[in-house]
Image (spheres, helix red, strand yellow):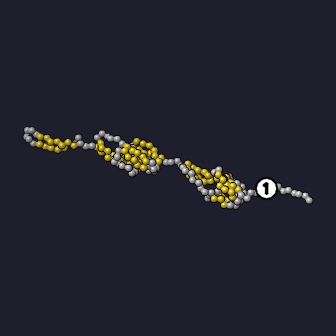
Amino acid sequence: SELVIVDTPVTPSTYTVTVDGAVLGSYSVGDVVTLTVPVKEGYTFNGWNSEDVTITDNTFTMPEHNVVVTSTWTEIVPVKHKVYVDGVEQGEYSVGDVVTVSTTDREGYTFNGWTSEPTVTFADFRAKTTTFTMIDSDVSVTPVYVEIKLYWAVTITNEGTGGTSSGTIQV
């Protein structure tokens, strides 16, 4: 009697799935594998890449080999908006930033508050230095001044007739 040895490769019963370098688990051929969309601060998830399987709606059917999957991302670039104070650019800010604006005295005028376009809510619009929370738009802020008007009371006396005349003079 003759002994015949047949060298038959043993097929593993499960294969591994590796996602972004970490082993997700072992799966049998034909299993439906569902990938969980990860969260990555400051990035938007674009989808999955794999040379081993086609992934649809975050799932694929396990083939008869190991699978490597890589997530793809796009960095979220914060949008910055400009702040102008009295027509001069003060800086760029992200939505939600607290912006400080200030003004100084102007000779002959009294400070009377702030206006803005578009409208923002000032912490204290009557203060020469105040803050507002940045909105999703460029903002123009203008200090409002009122001219100081001086009035003098004047009385004129005519010494020859003794008559008087009185009134006010704006200076």
- The residue depicted at 7 percent of the width and 40 percent of the height is 161
- Which sits in the foreground, 171 or 38? 38
User: Looking at this rendering, what residue extends furthest in the left direction?
Assistant: 161
Instruction: Mark yes or no: residue 153 visible.
Output: yes
Quadrant of the frame with the C terminus: top left
Q: Classify residue 147 as left or right of residue 65.
A: left
Position of residue 167 measured from the top left corner of the image (x, y, whole percent) = 17, 44
Position of residue 109 measured from the top left corner of the image (x, y, whole percent) = 29, 42
Query: Looking at numbered disc 1 in the image, what kind of residue is underneath it?
Result: Pro
SS under mark 1: loop
Position of residue 155 measured from the top left corner of the image (x, y, whole percent) = 15, 42
- The residue depicted at 42 percent of the width and 42 percent of the height is 90
Image label count: 1
Instruction: Mark yes or no: residue 49 visible.
Output: no
Occupied quadrant, residue 162? top left
Disc 1: which residue = 9
Q: Residues within 10 Å of mark 1 (few under 14, many from 20)?
A: few
Position of residue 41 measured from the top left corner of the image (x, y, whole percent) = 55, 50
Q: Classify residue 72 as left or right of residue 119.
A: right
